[in-house]
Amino acid sequence: MEFLLDPNLWIAFAMLTALEIVLGIDNIIFISILVGRLPAEQRDRARRLGLGFAMVTRVLLLLSLSWVMGLTSDLFSLFGKGISGRDIVLLLGGIFLLYKASHEIFVEVEAPDQHEPGESATAAAAARRGVFWGVIGQIAIIDIVFSLDSVITAVGMVDQIGVMIAAVMASVGVMLVAAKPIGDFVDRHPSVKVLALAFLVMVGMALTAEAFDAHIPKGYIYAAMAFSLAVEALNIRSRSKRQAQPA
């Protein structure tokens, strides 16, 4: 147990946990958007399952580090450029995220969900079950994409597998606490929801570019998103003040 007294280990744990939380922001937003499509009584369960999948995926990838690092080796060449397993995963994940975020923006802006008045209770329950597991399946798919980059980043920072797993579990714990307030805030403000979806489009574009070795630092994406959120926060405050004023 003497290794627990090593300050370098705790510094590495704190840095990696913070990095995992930052890298998990896009995952939380994606989960919040999808969970918002579910009935209120199913949302907490979906959040827990979604983030549980994220943790399990990251831990399994960490336990198979040799396979993960092998994904960075070129499998074949295309137009003189080497294509690795990681490139394929990032490309497919980026395309999926671009499609899903664009589709959700269309639904939110042009075709909001409408309930069928003649739908039976049994059919409605079956539909809800289908939607629930459909949402969980989509979360699981994108978890794999986000987890892959997260694990490769962790390997570059820390040598001890135990520290990596502990940092992943700690970061998922923080995300479990943060996911509900973030999801509720996004649901209360439709304009923020569209902004979050636009952020996911940016992430999808970054993943697709990364697959072709065009690296876009996530700091730029997060900075742009933070600026947009700050502007939207001012708009929300302005609207609230106007609504509070007597007519």
Image (cartoon, rainbow, N blue to C red):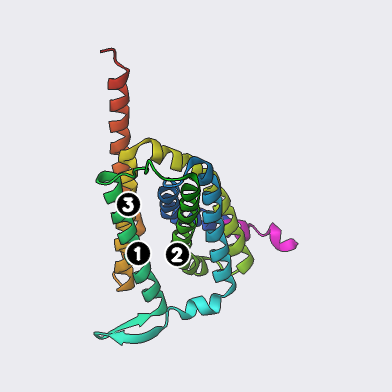
Q: Residue at x 70, y 57 (%)?
A: 5
**What is the three-letter code of the residue carrying label 1?**
Phe
Left or right: 242 in relation to 88:
left
Query: Number of numbered discs present?
Result: 3
> Between disc 1 and disc 2, whose residue precedes?
1
Q: Residue at x 37, y 66 (%)?
A: 93
Q: Residue at x 57, y 63 (%)?
A: 56
**What is the three-letter code of the residue carrying label 3?**
Glu
- Secondary structure of residue under mark 1: helix
In the rendered image, residue 218, in percent from the top left (x then y), is placed at 35, 58
Mark 2, other Cα within 10 Å: few <14 / some 14–19 / many ≥20? some
In the rendered image, residue 70, in percent from the top left (x then y), is placed at 48, 81
Task: Please name whichever residue, 117 or 207, is drawn nearer the observer in this view of the structure.
Answer: 117
- On residue 170, the disc is none
> Between disc 3 and disc 1, whose residue precedes?
1
- The residues colored magenta run 1-13
- Secondary structure of residue under mark 3: helix
Left or right: 136 in relation to 109:
right
* Magenta-span inclusion, residue 151: no
In the rendered image, residue 193, in percent from the top left (x then y), is placed at 34, 43
- On residue 96, the disc is 1
